[in-house]
Amino acid sequence: DGHEFIKEQLPGTDNLKINVIYTDQDGDVWVGSQKKGLFNYHNGYWYHHDVNSHPSTGKVPSILSITDSDNDIIWVGTNKGLFKLSKKTKHIHKHKHKILQDMTINALKMSGSEQLIIGSVGHIIFYQLSSNTHTKYALKDKPKSTVHDMAVREKNVWLATSSGLLIFSTDKKVFLESPQNIPKTRIVNIITHGKTMWIATLDKGLFVLDQNNQFNNFRASDFESSLSDQYIKTIYISN
């Protein structure tokens, strides 16, 4: 149909492994890599930002998650803690916090303008940016599960984890019962689009929660172009 894939060559890289792609509020694209740093696409050009957790040894962490806040700050979650980049100064540094500075941060999501939600292994953290305080909650009956992604819908935080879908009530501060019609399988990506939620699993296909809170499951056989199996890792909805 005339479409063509073009391979982007990011500056100074070969054999680059990409872990996460994020578009910020200004439309800039951020790419987090495996031990090769952070890349930014702005006004038609790629820029590279060094992310170094141990400047003296030269060890570069793997970037696992990215989000941004209203004050032109890019938050970067790695396997060696939380980093903070100013879009104005282009300066990036490790964020100092006794819990977060060395934690593996698999997922990041802003809730409002002052609260950063952090997903890791076995728990989620609600971090208040202005006061530099946090509240930590263990995953319900899943101490070894990894939070791969998160979505905020109404007053609940939906967690895509290695052992299924979890829902945390921000009002009651407790985990709610998970939907029975979503199997307890590895969920890696979850996004909202309007009042619809899309959930990607690694072996059960695609689940969609519509505006009437009804779940639908789409499997490989439902697609004319045929997915080869039920493996879905990433969802993207274009405008």
Image (cartoon, grey):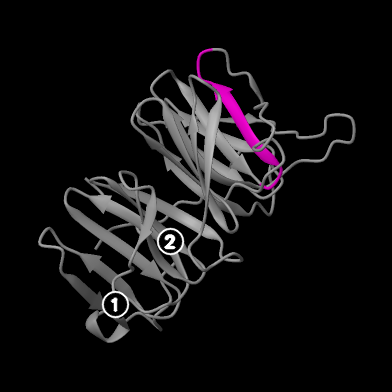
Q: Quadrant of the C terminus?
A: top left
Badge 2: residue crowd in 10 Å (few <14, some 14–19, many ≥20): many
Q: Can residue 29 be seen in this snapshot?
A: no
Q: Does the magenta stretch include residue 86?
A: yes
What is the total number of numbered labels drawn onto the structure image?
2
Please, is residue 181 above or below residue 1 in the view? Answer: below
Q: Does the magenta stretch include residue 172?
A: no
- Is 83 on the left or on the right of 54, as rendered? left
Foreground of the two, 94 or 126: 126
**On the image, numbered disc 1 is attached to which residue?**
180
- Is 181 on the left or on the right of 187, as rendered? left
Residue under the image location 76 percent in, 35 percent down: 53
Judged from the image, the secondary structure of the residue bearing numbered disc 2 is strand
| Amino acid at circle 1 | Gln
Foreground of the two, 194 or 47: 194
- Is 73 on the left or on the right of 37, as rendered? left
Tell me which corner region of the image, top left, top right, bottom left or bottom right, holds residue 211: bottom left
Q: Position of residue 81 (x, y in %)?
A: 67, 39
Judged from the image, the secondary structure of the residue bearing numbered disc 1 is loop
Foreground of the two, 21 or 13: 21
- Residues rendered magenta in the picture: 79-88
For the stretch drawn in magenta, the main secondary structure is strand
Mark 1 or mark 2, which has the lower sequence index?
2
Residue under the image location 54 percent in, 67 percent down: 142
**On the image, numbered disc 2 is attached to which residue?**
160
Q: Which residue lies furthest to the bottom in this view?
A: 221
- Is 131 on the left or on the right of 184, as rendered? right
| Amino acid at circle 2 | Ala
Q: Residue furthest top?
A: 89
